[in-house]
Amino acid sequence: TIAGVSLRASIEFLRAAPPAAQVLEAAELRSWGELGRRLALGDVETAVSFFMNSGNDLKHVPPDVRPLVLQVCARQMMLSSAAAIETLRTAAALAKAVNNAAVLLSVFEIAAEISRRSARHSADFLNTTPPVVEALKRFKDNAGVVSAALSLASAFALRAGGIASDLWAALPQATASLEAESAVRLFKRTGEFLERGGGAALHVLTAGGDMLR
């Protein structure tokens, strides 16, 4: 199928496939190849570079998360090839920064939902994740706060799409100097305002954080 678009890209795929197959399962390898095929439709040189350099990008991503990473990339590719390439090439660094397979899986599930509407916002959400996770580490009940934050982000993604990335970016400042109980309460109240719109709920988060401080 790649050769039907570009013989050169298909040759690079064949060269890159053996080492990539040491990391990826068969279905994942097909998804990876399909990403390259779509790139070749737009620009052959970009596809060739993709096959030459991206085969090991998923090596340090937990196996359970890899299919979701490729799913997010496939959805992003329909809207922005640059966002898809960025997501694939930074997945390993994101996995290292999060350092928790369950949290990482939730992050990519949320990104997958956002990518249904906006490739750029889903990429922004992923790029913002390391500082958000770092900011939430200061809470004593870290697991509870992180779980509540992920639940809120998931609700935003389902109801408000790309605004979820704005919410995610606002979390560190909104929760600064708060106790864990207050942060979880703030997330719950913010979620309740989603029925009034993503913008209103986001305002509740930022203003509510200021009031609690």
Image: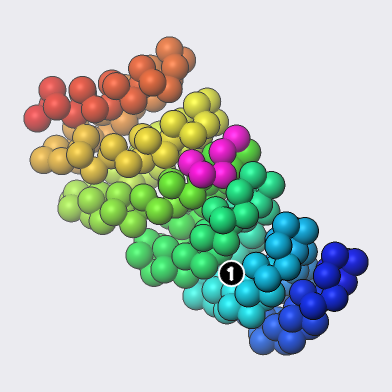
Q: Looking at the image, which is closer to me, 28 or 89?
A: 89
**Eyeballing the image, is 144 above or below 29?**
above
**Mark 1 crowd level (few <14, some 14–19, many ≥20, 10 Å Cα):** some
Residue name at image x 64 percent, y 80 percent: 52
The extreme top residue here reads 196
Say if the magenta span includes residue 141. no
Residue 163 lies left or right of residue 75; in this view the side is left
The kind of secondary structure element at disc 1 is loop
Q: Quadrant of the C terminus?
A: top left
The image shows residue 115 at horizontal and vertical percentages of 58, 42
Residue appearing at x 31%, y 31% in the figure:
187
Q: Could you tell me if residue 189 is visible in this image?
A: yes
Q: Main secondary structure of the magenta part?
A: helix
**Range shown magenta:** 117-121
What residue is disc 1 on?
63
- Amino acid type, label 1: Pro
